[in-house]
Amino acid sequence: MNLLVARYFGIGNEILFNLQVIGAASWHGNSPALLFMVRMFGILLITFQRYVTVCWPTNWIDSVISHLHPMILVIIHYTVPCILYSPAFIVGTTEFKDSVALFIINGPNHVQLLSIIVIIMFLISFVMIVFMYLSILKVIFITKKNGSSSSGRFVFQQSNYHREMRLAAHVFLLSLMSATIFLYYWNEYSMTRNPGNVENWTSLRAYYPILSSNFSYINPITLILLNKDIQKMMRHMIFGSKKPIPVTPQSLKVASTSIQMT
């Protein structure tokens, strides 16, 4: 049951309040941080797939990824963040304040733990994304200049070069929005360490839906604006066409992972 529907429309308040004994409050209290980790891990998966394809095109990992079933990608996308976040579910004690507002009460220790998990996840993912995209951009520019990479392999045609630059812009915007949510958790962790900041910490939580919504909207918007294959599919759906639409497998995998993040 959706928490926002219960809060603002008064539908199912009592049911949701009574379900907290089986984890409803715990789920709603932990799901924002977990969802952010899922999104951040999705950006990491997109970057890793492009890194292997561009920088190690003949590696066995590239072959495995190319033949990977989409459902396995979905399972990996959600399972890894859930495992990393599981200590917060186990240790946390979350409850609803009342059955009307359904305000979620998290203990300071629980908030500190989930903030630490999110911060560590973000920092590790961010460092890996920066490293991989610097490597990707290096190969892109070397290939554009010399016609082949430093290893002598021809990697890009002009159209592929533009596609990689659009994808880099997509990942950059997603990383930028994830950094704003990271700053939220960093401030939350800092405030919960000081008992005198409890009111400020509570007020800070009002900003999270705005940041999370921006993250959700920027992903499909950039996907539509920057992914040519998605644009072709949308034009085909709206205007119709008798000609088949050529779609690259790489773009479909990126789009699939991006859609899971919304």
Image (tube, rainbow, N blue to C red):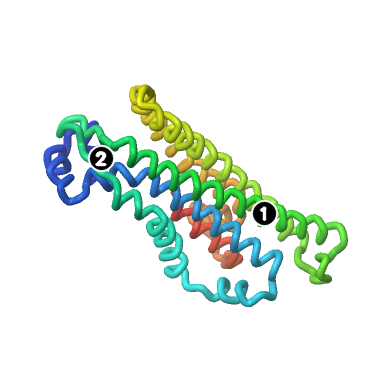
The amino acid marked with disc number 2 is: Leu
Residue behind mark 1: 131
Residue depicted at x 67% and y 54%: 131
Q: Tally the numbered discs.
A: 2
Q: Is residue 217 left or right of residue 10?
A: right
Separation of marks 1 and 2 at Cα, in angstroms: 39 Å
Asked if marks 1 and 2 touch (Cβ < 8 Å), the reply is: no
Q: Nearer the viewer, residue 242 or 169?
A: 169
Sequence-first disc among 1 and 2: 2
Give the image location of residue 34, x and y in percent. Answer: 39, 49
Q: Residues within 10 Å of mark 1 (few under 14, many from 20)?
A: few
Determine whether the residue tagged by mark 2 lies in a helix, strand or loop: helix
Residue 243 in view in this figure:
no
Q: How crowded is the residue under tag 2: few (<14 C-alpha within 10 Å), some, or many (20+)?
A: some
**Callout 1 amino acid:** Phe
- Quadrant in the picture for residue 143: bottom right
Name which residue lies at 69% across and 51% down: 165
Q: Position of residue 95 (x, y in %)?
A: 21, 39
Q: Residue at x 29, y 37 (%)?
A: 106
Left or right, residue 26 beside residue 160:
left
Q: Which residue is mark 2?
A: 3
